[in-house]
Image: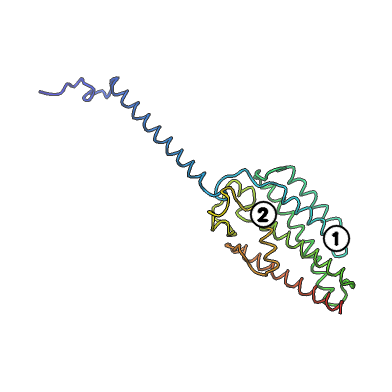
Amino acid sequence: MTDNPSGPAGDPSGSAGPEEHAALKARLSRLELLLGKEYSLAGEAAHMLPAWLRRTSGEPRLAVSVAVLAMIGLQLVVPEFGVKPVWLLPAMQVLLFAVLVAANPSRITRESKLLRLIGLALVLAASVGNAWAATVLVYQVAHGSGPKPATHLLVTGGAIWLTNVIIFALWYWELDRGGPAARAAARHIHPDFLFSEMTTPELVRRDWEPGFVDYFYLSFTNATAFSPTDTLPLSSWAKLAMMFQSAVSLVTVALVVSRAVNIFS
C-alpha cells in the first residue's frame, strides 16, 4: 500500500492545500510576535542604560551661553593686554556665538560639520586672545613693568586666569565624545573623561549626563589643584590638555601673586 501521490505531502508539483497555507500563516504570525517581543526587549534594555550612553533630548543652551558671554566680557576687562584692535576678537566671538545660538537656540541637538567648525573656531579665537594677554602679562611681570597698583595686577591676573578656566572648559565640552550634539545622539561609547557619576550610576539620576557645568568644574579644579580631582582623563588629548592647562595656571598664578606681594611689601 502506497501513499496517495496526490495528497498534500506527496504532491509532485509542490503545491500546498488550504491546511498547509493556514499552518504556514500561523508560524509566520508566531515569528512576527517573537521578533516584536525581541525588539521591545531591546528598546527596554536601551532605556535602562544611563543617559550618557543613549540618545537624549540634548543639553540646554543656557549654561554654556552664560559662560561664553562671561568669557567675552572678561576679555574686555583687560583691553591693554588684548590683541589689537581690542574689539576684533570679541566681535568675532559674538558673531560666531550668534550663529550657534540661531542653529540650536534651546537645546544642542543639531549635528553639522559647519556648526562644529564654528564652535571650535569660537573657542580657538578666545584661546588666541587670552594666550596673548597671558603672555604679555607674564612678560611685563617678569621684567618689572607690569601693572603697578597691586589691586590692578590682581584683577588683571584674575580675569585672565578665569577666562582661561572657561576656555578650557569649552575645549573639554566641545571635544569629549565628539561634542554636545554627538553626545546627545550617543555617537560614541567611549568617553574621553571619566566622571564620578559614571562609576557610581546607582547614586545619580538615570537621566544624568555630563553638561557644561561638569566640564567647568573639571576645568576649575584642574586649574586650582594642578591635577585631576574626581574626573580622570582617558584619552591622550585629554591628558595633554589638562597638563597644559595646569602648567599655564601655575605660571600665571605664581608670577602674579609673587609680584603682587612684592608691590604690597
Question: On the rendered image, what quadrant is the N terminus found in?
Answer: top left
The quarter of the displayed image where residue 233 is located: bottom right
Residue type at mark 1: give it.
Answer: Val
From the top left corner, tell me how far across and down residue 88 is, in percent.
84, 55
| Residue at x 68% of width, y 46% of height | 60
The residue labelled by disc 1 is 77
- Name the outermost residue toward the front: 203
Please report the residue visible at 87 percent of the width from the left and 77 percent of the height from the top.
264
The vertical placement of 4 against 207, above or below, is above
Kindly identify which residue carries mark 2. 174
Q: What type is the residue that disc 2 sits on?
A: Glu
- Whether pointer 2 and pointer 1 mark residues with C-beta atoms closer than 8 Å, the reply is no
Image coords of residue 224 (percent x, y): 70, 68
- Characterize the local packing of mark 2: few (<14), some (14-19) or many (20 or more) Cα atoms within 10 angstroms: many
Numbered circle sitting on residue 89: none
Which label lies toward us, 2 or 1? 1
Look at the numbered disc 1 and give the secondary structure of its residue. Answer: helix
Q: How many marks?
A: 2
Residue 206 is left or right of residue 69, and the answer is left
